[in-house]
Image (spheres, helix red, strand yellow):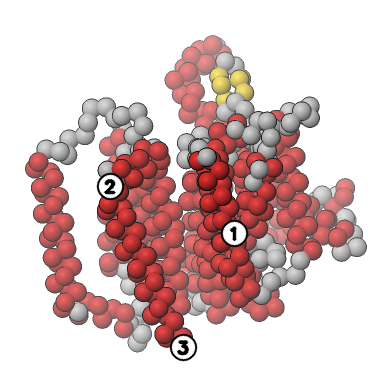
Amino acid sequence: MIDDAIEFLEPYTYLIIGSVKALVIAGALLGIVPLLVWLERRLMGRFQVRLGPNRVGPFGLGQPISDSIKLLFKESIIQGSADKFLFHLAPAIVVFTAIVTFAVIPFGDPITVMDQEIGLWAANVDIGLLFVFAISGMGIYGMVLAGFSSNNKYSLMGGLRSSAQMISYELTLGLAALSVIVLTGSLSLIDMVNSQDSYPNILIQPLAFLLFFIAGVAETNRAPFDLPEAEQELVAGFHTEYTGMKFAMFFMGEYINMVTMSALVTLLFLGGWNSYGIPVWPIIAFAGKVGFLLCVFIWLRSTYPRIRYDRLMTFGWKVLVPLSLLNLLVTSVFVVL
Amino acid sequence: MELLIFYPLAGLCVAFALGVVINNSPVGSAMSLIAMMLGLAGIFVLQQAHFIAVLQIIIYAGAIMVLFMFVIMLLNLKGSGEDASWRSRDKNLLMTVLSGFLVAGLLYKILCVLNSGEFDSPASLPENFGTAREVGTILFTEFVLPFEVASILLLVAMIGAVVLAKNKVD
């Protein structure tokens, strides 16, 4: 009976494995979001010498669940002057692009289950890094459209700011990643990790690491670069008019982008799942590095005040871009020699 | 199998391309254009040209269209009502004639290619077809002159834009 079933399913193995992997990864990503929200609120509490949420469940772990139930059942209000179609489309674009970006992120060497070699990634694209940039670039439209369709000047300003900020910092992000690409000679994220099996790239590319991480914080719209939603000037920026689950979807997108950005930094600079002699499973090593970077994100948020908008642009164009160009030049010269 | 994916993609592309022209609001037009470019990228993937497909998304759908949206939103074009001045383009005779010439030229070229028989796809693709390495090699050997000319053109346009914008600010 079982043999028959296996025989029948044989030709579809590739399809089945692919779908299972996609479901597991998407599910895990969505499951991480409430955990991250909880972690952020608890850590922020500690940083600010208060307790943070600790009433619902052990250590307050029930808090994100009750919060999401509240958001799910909240009435969704759309003001009459909004562009209905784009208003609904915008949060969907944000979450969709955030999840799809993660598809090409590998998190371990292939494992073998039932004579089938299964790679620990949803899709192995030989231009993985470019794919990440392409799809995360599409995510900008979510914010721009949210700002535009709300028909509200604060939202519009938030949307404009986010697009300007993301275009500017994408440049630094790409240039910093380019120096790693030049070192590795490949665009595949798996090749990049394999090339770091003796030492991580951060040791030879400390400047690129710093530039990439700063630009990454700006790309995910996190403090101190959360200008698109600066509340003292813009109410809440591009999501001012959103309520209920659609409001929460923007934050789901933001947190998933945070995970993706941490995973990218880990893959490019921290050696991915290589554990350098420490006896842990590769996947634990990877998760540990990503978790550490996520804590750094939260740490940054509670440490630095938001910077002014014109300073943000000046910093991006007059400091980060020249530095990353210089870094790329020096790296290329060394590689050629 | 390939055709099964090609026809829906091509159909979507044509539909969205029409959407660009007939849409009432500028933002709707821009969104259709983005969707059309994503469809084109899909067709590139179908042709095994993954690198070109990703470039299509990064440069056209990503960078250039964000700037389009930026301009549309800064000028706050609504398209409907009294503020329909952006539609005056359809009364511009020179534009109409020029774009007519452009379309005629394109159609003529397409007919030439179709008739010359070069259109038949090769039976088997070379192994490195469409990879970043291959595209780069061709760009910097066979097509290096047009590539450099295009770069200089873009540089001149960029400097021109900066100079013009600076005059306005002062």
Label 2: element kind: loop
**Few, some or many residues within 10 Å of mark 2 (<14, 14–19, 20+):** few
**Few, some or many residues within 10 Å of mark 3 (<14, 14–19, 20+):** few
Q: CA distance from mark 3 to mark 1?
A: 29 Å
* Residue A137: percent from left, percent from top: 50, 56
Locate residue B35 relative to residue A254 in the image: left or right.
left
* Residue A182: percent from left, percent from top: 52, 42
Q: Quadrant of the N terminus of chain A?
A: top right
* Residue B32: percent from left, percent from top: 36, 61
Q: CA distance from mark 3 to mark 2?
A: 41 Å
Identity of the residue drawn at 38% across and 74% down: B161
The residue at which mark 2 appears reads as: B143
Label 1: element kind: helix
Identity of the residue drawn at 10% across and 47% down: B112
Judging depth in this view, the residue of A111 and A128 nearest the camera is A128
Chain letter of the residue carrying label 3: B
Identity of the residue drawn at 57% across and 28% down: A119
**Does the image show residue A213?**
no
Identified by mark 2, the residue type is Phe
Q: Quadrant of residue A203?
A: top right
Identified by mark 3, the residue type is Asp
The residue at which mark 1 appears reads as: A323
The residue at which mark 3 appears reads as: B170
Chain letter of the residue carrying label 1: A
Locate residue A180 relative to residue A270 in the image: left or right.
left
Q: CA distance from mark 1 to mark 2?
A: 31 Å
* Same subunit, tags 3 and 2: yes
Between tags 3 and 1, which lies in front? 1
Label 3: element kind: loop
